[in-house]
Structure formats: C-alpha cells, structure tokens
Image (cartoon, rainbow, N blue to C red):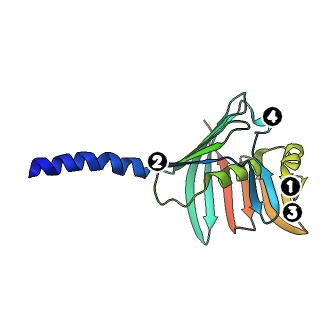
C-alpha cells in the first residue's frame, strides 16, 4: 500500500509543478491603457536598445504598498526581457518581447494579480523619449515640461510621471495606483 502511495505522489508532483507556472502569449501589440487610448508595444524605442538596469519598484494601490525588484534588458535587436521579483528575490513574472513578435509572459507564483503587459506599458511611458512615445500612443497626448511628464486624454490627466534624480514616480489616475521606480546602484 505504501509503495502505491509513493508512485501516486511521484506522478502527482510533476503535475503540481507544471500548474505552478503559467505562460501566455499576447499577439496584439496595441494595449488599451485607458478607455480609447492605445499604446503600441510592437517595438522598443531605439534609445532603449542595448540597455540593462535593475530597479526597486514601490507599488501603492488601495492603501497597500508592495516592494518589487525588476531587471530589464533590451538587446541591440530590440528584444526585451523583464523579470519582476519579490523583495526577497523570488521570481514572480517573466516577460519576453521581440520586435513584431508575440509577447510571452510567464507567472512563476500562482495567484499573483500582476499583469506584466501593463508593467511593460508603465516602463514604456516612463522611459521612452517623448517623440517616440507620441508616435506609439493613439488617443492621448504626451506633454513633458521640466521634470514632469503628463499623459492626457480629453482634458483629463491619465498619468503623471515625475523624474527626481534616481527616482521616478508614475501615478496612474485610471487604475488608481502609483509606482515609484528607484535605480539600484551597483
């Protein structure tokens, strides 16, 4: 009887491990970041090619704050790889996006309600140059004055981005959250 239980356990363990990670592909490059506002994520801004960085992300929503670590790399062909981890270094989400290809996202922790596509959109809104962002955005306007960038639609501010040295804060007024990106110095 115990040998039969051991075999069942051996068969069940791979099934559990396979369901812990889930991947999905997103073929549509345009993401609706707000009603009637689309952001084209088909390619990366040329200025991001060859870049790598690590940042701590402080995410505040519904009066809760979460600390996440992010690693981003964009090769010279424009293929982006993004890894989001807990503050302890446990991987949560991995995203890979080659130019003009489907986006592949893998959730490593079940039950995490974080959409890597929207994280990528937030990174684009923060890091892409205004000229490139304007070309990729439909239905909204980008205005940057000094250390502040606004994404607006029909007179309403959808996003407010503030640059302060090694810290950048993005406020999403549509989905009511704030992300503070802080560069990790090496």
Cβ atoms under marks 2 and 1 closer than 8 Å: no
Q: Which residue is mark 4?
A: 46
Tell me if mark 3 has few (under 14), some (14-19) or many (20+) residues whose alpha carbon lies within 10 angstroms of its own. some
Is residue 114 left or right of 145 when viewed as pictured? left
Q: Position of residue 96 (x, y in %)?
A: 62, 40
Of callouts 3 and 2, the N-terminal one: 2
Q: Position of residue 179 (x, y in %)?
A: 67, 58
Is residue 82 left or right of 39 when viewed as pictured? left
Q: Which residue is mark 1?
A: 138
Q: Nearer the viewer, mark 1 or mark 3?
A: 1
Residue at screen point 77% across, 45% down: 127
Which sits in the foreground, 35 or 7? 7
Of callouts 4 and 3, the N-terminal one: 4
Spatial CA distance of label 4 from label 2 is 31 Å
Q: Does residue 34 appear in the picture of this structure?
A: yes
Spatial CA distance of label 4 from label 3 is 24 Å
Toward the bottom, the furthest residue is: 63
Spatial CA distance of label 1 from label 4 is 19 Å
Cβ atoms under marks 1 and 4 closer than 8 Å: no
Of callouts 2 and 1, the N-terminal one: 2
Is residue 119 left or right of 162 when viewed as pictured? left
Residue at screen point 71% across, 46% down: 166
Which sits in the foreground, 24 or 56? 24
Badge 3 marks a residue whose secondary structure is: strand
Q: Which residue is mark 3?
A: 152
Q: Nearer the viewer, mark 2 or mark 1?
A: 1
């Amino acid at each position: 009887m115990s040998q039969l239980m051991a075999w069942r356990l051996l068969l069940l363990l791979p099934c559990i491990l396979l369901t812990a990670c889930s991947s999905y592909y997103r073929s549509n490059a345009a993401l609706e970041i707000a009603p009637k506002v689309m952001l084209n994520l088909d390619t990366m801004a040329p200025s991001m090619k060859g870049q790598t960085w690590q940042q701590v992300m402080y995410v505040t929503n519904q009066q809760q704050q979460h600390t996440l670590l992010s690693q981003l790399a964009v090769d010279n062909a424009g293929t982006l790889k993004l890894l989001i981890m807990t503050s302890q270094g446990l991987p949560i989400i991995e995203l890979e996006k080659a130019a003009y290809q489907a986006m592949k996202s893998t959730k490593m922790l079940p039950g995490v309600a974080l959409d890597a596509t929207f994280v990528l959109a937030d990174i684009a809104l923060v890091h892409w140059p205004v000229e490139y962002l304007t070309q990729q955005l439909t239905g909204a306007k980008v205005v940057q004055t000094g250390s502040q960038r606004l994404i607006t639609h029909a007179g309403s501010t959808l996003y407010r981005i503030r640059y302060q040295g090694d810290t950048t804060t993005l406020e999403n007024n549509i989905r009511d959250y704030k992300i503070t990106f802080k560069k990790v110095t090496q």
